Image (cartoon, rainbow, N blue to C red):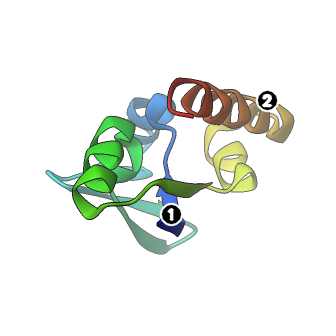
Amino acid sequence: MNIDVHAHFMDVSHGSELVERGYLELGSNQAVIKVKGVSSTIYMIAGDIKGQIRDMDEAGLDMRVLSCTMQVNTLSHLLNESPLKIAREINDKMASIVEEYP
């Protein structure tokens, strides 16, 4: 069994709001998030689960361990939302992905 133990997932449900607030710049295959003067690149495949599954199949991977690219505290700060609310949203999204792609 081939397992990728280091892969990222990005919940894109807040993407448009982050763009509107000036925290996220979208490119064709990557996004740049800016937090407190620090910029980080996030590759768009992180938000494309079907694309990740396709890439896994092409690479011969049987399983992938996903971690969320955005920290709960960062999203909470940027969106002015409760960290608990953000954590629940991310956990629910991750659970739905696991349910759909066991």
How many discs mark residues in the rendered view? 2
93 is higher (above) or lower (below) than 75? above
Q: Nearer the viewer, residue 53 or 67?
A: 53
Query: Residue 5 placed where, x, y %?
Result: 57, 69
Query: Residue 33 placed where, x, y %?
Result: 43, 59
- Quarter of image, res 62: bottom left
Query: Residue 94 placed where, x, y %?
Result: 63, 36
Q: Residue furthest left?
A: 28
Crowd tier of the residue under label 1, counting other residues whose Cα lies within 10 Å: few below 14, some 14–19, many 20 or above:
few
Q: Residue at x 60, y 34 (%)?
A: 98
CA separation, marks 2 and 1? 36 Å
Left or right, 46 with respect to 80, comes to left
Query: Residue 71 placed where, x, y %?
Result: 67, 56
Left or right, 74 with respect to 23, comes to right
- Quarter of image, res 82: top right
Q: Quadrant of the C terminus?
A: top right
Q: Residue at x 29, y 51 (%)?
A: 57
Which numbered disc covers residue 85?
2
Q: Residue at x 72, y 50 (%)?
A: 72
- The residue that disc 1 covers is 1
**Chain-order first, disc 2 or disc 1:** 1
Q: Nearer the viewer, mark 2 or mark 1?
A: 1
Left or right, 76 with respect to 50, comes to right
Task: Tell me which amino acid carries mark 2.
Answer: Lys
Task: Tell me which amino acid carries mark 1.
Answer: Met
Q: Residue at x 51, y 39 (%)?
A: 11
4 is higher (above) or lower (below) than 18? below
Q: Nearer the viewer, residue 5 or 57?
A: 57
Q: Residue furthest right?
A: 84
